[in-house]
Amino acid sequence: MDVFIGNLPASTSFNEIRQLHGHWDFDVPVTRVDGQDRRGKEFHYFLAHFPPRDETEAERLIQDMAGVSCYGRVLDVREFIHRSYSNERRALDWREKPWHKPERRVSERRESSKH
């Protein structure tokens, strides 16, 4: 199970997360993820990768970190849900494909003011 530790300020280090937990004794790999959403807003989170045999420790981490705040932000600690592109109904390159059908907005007021 992967545990998502999110809603982090950019400057947060993993050692700070360990100190917030108090007794982090998990020997699991942790990955830091930094990125931007479509609007350009930055996001930062950690993923702790627990093997299947240690799922009880992952659940303990989620319970222990509930309501903990870091730099005035309440952390979002939960099981990480992997999203698959196969669940997406559109083609991956749908924005690059030309549209050969009639435009649906022709009858809308936005288009009628141009004529």
Image: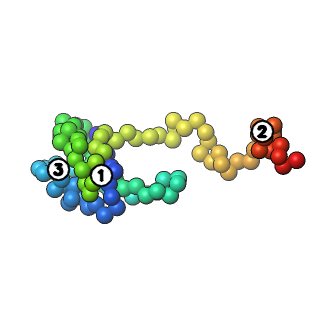
What amino acid is labelled 1 in the image? Arg
Q: Answer with left or right where residue 97 lies relative to residue 82.
A: right
Residue 88: quarter of image? top right
Above or below — where is 59 with respect to 6? above
Q: Residue at x 65, y 48 (%)?
A: 95
- Within 10 Å of the Cα at label 3, are there few (<14), some (14-19), or many (20+) other Cα atoms? some
Pointers 3 and 2 in contact (CB under 8 A)?
Answer: no
- Horizontal and vertical percent for residue 19? 16, 56
- Under mark 3, the amino acid is His
Q: Which residue in the structure is indicated by mark 2?
A: 108
Task: Estimate how packed mark 2 is, as few (under 14), some (14 to 19) or many (20 or more) residues with alpha carbons within 10 Å.
Answer: few
- Measure the alpha-carbon separation of dots 3 and 1: 15 Å
Label 1 vs 2, first from the N-terminus: 1
Q: Are marks 3 and 1 in contact (CB under 8 Å)?
A: no
**Residue count near mark 1 (Cα–Cα under 10 Å), binned few <14, some 14–19, many ≥20:** few
Q: Position of residue 83 (x, y in %)?
A: 44, 40
Q: What numbered label is drawn on residue 21?
A: 3
Three-letter residue code for mark 2: Glu
**Numbered label attached to residue 73:** 1
Can the viewer see residue 48?
A: yes
Mark found first going from the N terminus, 3 or 2 = 3
Residue 89 figure quarter: top right
